[in-house]
Amino acid sequence: MNKTARPVESAGGTFHISDVYPSVDGGRFAVKRIAGEPVEVWADIYRDGQDVIAAALVWRHDAGGEWQRAPMTLHSNDRWGSAFVPDQPGRYVFAIEAWTDEFASWRQRFEQQQTTGSDLTLDAIEGAGMLTKAHAGGPADAAVIIKQCELYLATGEAGALLVPELKQAMTESQYRADLTRSPLFPLVADRPRALNGAWYQMFPRSQGKVPGEHATFNDCIARLPDIAAMGFDVVHLTPIHPIGQERRKGRNNAAIAQPGDPGSPYAIGSAEGGHDAVHPQLGTLDDFRAFVAACQAHGMEVALDFAVQCSPDHPWLKQHPQWFKRRPDGSMRTAKYRPQRWDDVINPDFAGEDAGALWHALRDVVLFWVDQGVRIFRVDNPHTEPLPFWEWLIREVQRHDANVLFLAEAFAQPKVMKGLAKLGFTQSYTYFTWRTQRGELEQYLGELIGYPERDFFRPNFFVNTPDILPFHLQSGESWMFKSRLALAATLSSNYGIYSGFELLEHAPIPGREDYLNSEKYEIKVRDWELSGNIKPYVTALNRIRRGNPALQQTANLRFIDIEDGNVIGFVKESVDQSNVIVAAIALTRDAREVWLALGDIKIGRDDARRSVTAVEDLVTGERYALEWGGVRLRIDPGRDPALLLRCVA
Amino acid sequence: MNKTARPVESAGGTFHISDVYPSVDGGRFAVKRIAGEPVEVWADIYRDGQDVIAAALVWRHDAGGEWQRAPMTLHSNDRWGSAFVPDQPGRYVFAIEAWTDEFASWRQRFEQQQTTGSDLTLDAIEGAGMLTKAHAGGPADAAVIIKQCELYLATGEAGALLVPELKQAMTESQYRADLTRSPLFPLVADRPRALNGAWYQMFPRSQGKVPGEHATFNDCIARLPDIAAMGFDVVHLTPIHPIGQERRKGRNNAAIAQPGDPGSPYAIGSAEGGHDAVHPQLGTLDDFRAFVAACQAHGMEVALDFAVQCSPDHPWLKQHPQWFKRRPDGSMRTAKYRPQRWDDVINPDFAGEDAGALWHALRDVVLFWVDQGVRIFRVDNPHTEPLPFWEWLIREVQRHDANVLFLAEAFAQPKVMKGLAKLGFTQSYTYFTWRTQRGELEQYLGELIGYPERDFFRPNFFVNTPDILPFHLQSGESWMFKSRLALAATLSSNYGIYSGFELLEHAPIPGREDYLNSEKYEIKVRDWELSGNIKPYVTALNRIRRGNPALQQTANLRFIDIEDGNVIGFVKESVDQSNVIVAAIALTRDAREVWLALGDIKIGRDDARRSVTAVEDLVTGERYALEWGGVRLRIDPGRDPALLLRCVA
């Protein structure tokens, strides 16, 4: 038998490194974090015997570069912790390294033996022998090692080997013969907008002032002051591309369009161009870039819709017929099997022989709009394209520009929605739009902010969408619109409205949760100052969100017990715990008083941690001192269904 | 760009397959099960879109052979389940396969479209076209496909394509173009003794009748009827090898042996041989084999101690000096740093240049004893040798003979003990030996039978060991010995006593949990019929264990609430739920009555499931009908601290 340090069949290293936190599906998918914020990392680390263990957290950009490292500290029960800061947006990998600190082990045994009075001459020689085998971690360490080695040789005193600075120098300078490294765990650090943003969705063609007339990007630019004044962060446009003529839909989803019907912007592509073209009636690509710049000037940014499907006259059908499946008669199948029976679009074939080129073309569409200054994409129905496609596309785009964010507009099974989040979507639509009862809101938020969901799923709460006018809004009552808005804007740090919500638009197709005369199929012109609008309320909420870091994140959320089951109460605190917000939001219209027990709430960290003594109403500015550990306050939903209180220590 | 079905950089298959149960550390370690018993397997499985998904559980022996498969069924929320039976002991791997049932998807869409009244001619042609592309799963399927294909061609009636037998045949016969397979998950199926056994540990040299005289294997054979009559399953011998002369320990762990002192059997090896030799005073290898055969004849089997350390005169020190580290003066370091300061043994060096040969030699020691008929090894202090060594050794030995079981005698940190179980030890010693209060017993059992521990950690509850005479036994009170025995024998399906327990031996080294005049350092001769012995009690407990499958497993355990905090109560049920046992065991000596609320206990499965109406005392045979949903019974620990009741429907 050959001399070997270990049989080749043997598995694993000296150490078991397990239960690594954070990780998603054991490292199969990336954990999500925000660039610049510390990432705590934990792992179980152990080996045989009693030797002194050392461990480090190592990390680097996924693309390469130098490994960085930070020591890990043993807390208890073989659980080690450390932290690192991914300083720039991007994809990172981290791992745990563990090794035996041989010199510290020797030192620990030596000190134990000293208490027994044994002759330790040989032990000291063994310890000294380790000094000459180290490869110094740096000049300072080398100096310490040389100095103590000389001192020991000159005096024969073991004390020279026991000085703490030598232990430290050796910890850095020893070979790590039994170093064991865990598998790599991926992590995506996004820019802050990934976690926090108020979205305003609109149909660009409806932003004009003349009824029946198709608006332009210039009309859209004219709308920005109003949207910015309401405090929105993201302006989300429905698709801006040419709309198919063939099989164009008419008003209210009629199978056949009437002359002059503009068609659905989700029927992408015509003789005028495809996914990388601008609808001529909106303007030119330059006009679009001007719109992007105007948004920036207002402190907002643009989110574009990315919908894969093609209208029957999309240029790709002629240019790349092999990307589409033919039926036995040579025709192409429309997407009529999709939930909403869209007969005006055709889905490309992701499993065809030339699918590789299709995948690349779709990626290039996204990169094209990135080149025009777009950094956020709201992806339409991503659960209808293959999961590996999205995983690949998002990786490719974010490799090109790590600031690009993707919102998954999927209302599918819970696990499919979570799967899309795992594979890379920055944010996700949720069931919030239909959750109205306190119990179901608490249960759903508990699921979204629990482990492991909080590490990969970032909710974006929409109160309505062009596809969803939920039943609870259909009576058009102002208090309900405000209640829903307050819930979305405070429960989730990402939330959005589809334009018209602020005007209390609520006319449904009878019996359904669809808008009557939906903008999807016609051009709308609105009076943005319509009487009864809740724009001041929207403005107040967005102002409060911007002023309170506690509301700029979702996971640090705790529900509080309120006796009245029609009022939902919760506490949110900022990452540094200095900003703590209490919310109590009415879910029915009656005015009432609520008792908020707030005695257990603390503000600040560590030594600076103090109990709350008062709360300040963030809308009225009034301050209420806690009495008997709480406050009794009135909610009148007719005026404002939400109490938003900042805790004061 | 080349035509490719998918960019080569893309990750994963069409399906996400995740949260696979059972698995340990995501498949890094093997799940433990019993051969012949069904293994339920669960996984989350989903893909994009609305197509019909099919999934299968596949498995085979780890060593190779044909894959076997069973269909998986969707339960709810994208969770799929199936089961397989690993019929023989051994290591298996299983995986989940998922694919799209294209024909069933077509059929589902077709039937949905039928309700709309659309023209489905093209759809029917598409479905028919799938028939000719199948490769029939078998002749019967082929016949169905051909027949329906002909019928459709002859009549043009789509109904020919919708018959259920065609759907079934196509499910079996289609190509599975998008088949996605999960990683492989390992599973070890052990023989039933891995899960259930009563152990009796003894020093073979102490089994004689003449004080001071070293016993032989023949003396051991003479002891077997007594041990078998008590109902034990496993006879565990401390090491049977030659004992070192050099640095031999004297009585009570004295540093220097007196002439005639036999030394510790854990100081393995002398000029007379090493780990593969028999201590000459015990007899020959043939005598040992006769002992193995005699155990078998009594329905018991032998467990051998496997301790890696060597005495200073072990033959390996001369034959393989490179397996041991030398100190600066040429001497070898004794294991004095080990917890019990064993100066009489030397640990080999697992990291030396020739460690590969050492690993193989140790494996060959185990295989040598397997050749002598031993199938159980109790490994001494495995947490002092490298974890990868044990993982490798156990795999190697079990590849040779899957019936070999390993018990880890590690009293280390919780995670190290669990790590040893994960890497392959069949059973584990536990902290039970020191857990005496109801709360701590409930907490500890909760941990051991919770997830994921129950899938890899099999406790073996020892009431005492040669190293541990726990304080609570030191007063020598019979009720306490009985209480501890009843707890061990009923809470855990694997339990053991170290001989002398049945005689209430309890003399400690004052102030310590060590036996005075420990057998580790001297030969003992006992009066096995000593007055006051609790052998009848041991016998009764083991009889009850053998008669009640509920007690032959550990995980199906639920604690019941008993008002008296000094009585612990629990219910155990057999895998088939037909045998249900209630235990109430007193933890203090006072007699008392306890109320056992048993109204929610059910017996049997599915339709045969019935409520319990009465309980039968398994010791006295008395039967008590439930009144007001429970029974009030008296426990008199002086007589018997345990109530063991079989539930009657």
Image: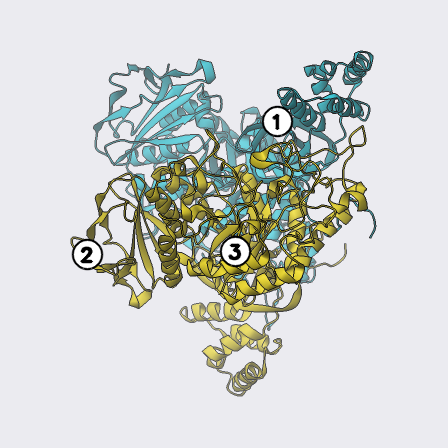
Chain colours: A cyan, B yellow
Q: Please say if B116 is above or below B387.
A: below
Please give the residue where the numbered disc 1 appears in the rendered image. Answer: A85
Q: Position of residue B24 (x, y in %)?
A: 55, 49
x and y percentages locating residue B628 in the rendered image: 16, 53
Q: Position of residue B96 (x, y in %)?
A: 56, 60
Label 2: chain letter: B
Q: Residue at x 59, y 57 (%)?
A: B217
- Residue B304 visible in the current orientation: yes
Quarter holding the N terminus of chain B is bottom right
Q: Which residue type does callout 2 highlight?
A: Leu
Q: Residue furthest left?
A: B628
| Marks 1 & 3 on one chain | no
> How many other residues sit within 10 Å of disc 3, few (<14), some (14-19) or many (≥20)?
many
Q: Earlier in the sequence, mark 2 or mark 3?
A: 3
Secondary structure, mark 3, is strand
**Residue at 55% of width from left, 57% of height from top?**
B219
Q: Chain of mark 3?
A: B
Q: Badge 3 is on which residue?
A: B235
Q: Spatial distance from mark 1 to mark 3, Cα to Cα?
A: 57 Å
Residue B401 makes an appearance in the image: no
Instruction: State which quadrant residue A534 falls in.
Output: top left
The disc numbered 1 marks a residue on which chain?
Answer: A
Q: What residue is at 81 percent from the left and 32 percent from the top?
A: B330
Q: Tell me the amino acid under the disc marked 1.
A: Val
**Residue annotated with mark 2:** B626
The quadrant of the rendering that contains the C terminus of chain B is bottom left
**Camera-side residue of A596 and B19:** B19
What whole-number distance in Å separates the C-alpha atoms at marks 2 and 3? Answer: 40 Å
The answer to whether A298 is drawn above or below residue A305 in the figure is above
Other residues around mark 2 within 10 Å, as few (<14) / some (14–19) / many (≥20): some
Give the label, 2 or 3, closer to the camera: 3
